[in-house]
Image (tube, helix red, strand yellow):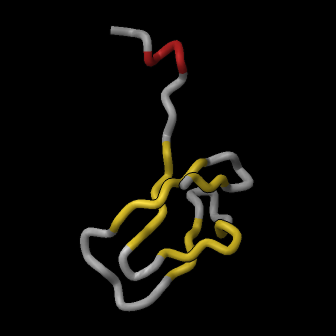
Amino acid sequence: MNYRCTCGTDYVVVPKEIPLANDEQVICDCGCPLKLRWSSRNFDYQPVYRTPAKEARKP
């Protein structure tokens, strides 16, 4: 599942290596909270950084 911040950053759900005791609200790198998104004890949200197409084709 993908979620997008208002700044345009995409986030995907990933499993946590070490479970936490409490849920936490997910905050984007820009400082905005992802609306209605909370990390759970076992899952979190990770930003997806995309490589521009021109740079991806370089050897």
Q: Residue at x 32, y 8 (%)?
A: 59
Q: Residue at x 62, y 56 (%)?
A: 3
The quadrant holding residue 29 is bottom right
Q: Residue 28 at x, y = what percent?
A: 59, 61
Q: Residue at x 44, y 68 (%)?
A: 44
- Residue 50 in the image: above or below residue 14: above
Residue sticking out furthest to the bottom: 21
| Numbered marks: total | 0
- Residue 59 in the image: above or below residue 46: above
Horizontal side of residue 32 vs 53, given as left or right: right
Residue sticking out furthest to the front: 1
Q: Residue 16 at x, y = what percent?
A: 32, 69
**Image quarter in which the N terminus is found:** bottom right
Horizontal side of residue 21 vs 26, given as left or right: left
Q: Nearer the viewer, residue 28 or 53?
A: 53
Q: Residue 48 at x, y = what percent?
A: 49, 45
Residue sticking out furthest to the right: 6
Horizontal side of residue 43 vs 32, given as left or right: left
- Residue 46 in the image: above or below residue 33: above
Q: Residue 22 at x, y = what percent?
A: 43, 90
- Residue 49 in the image: above or below residue 35: above
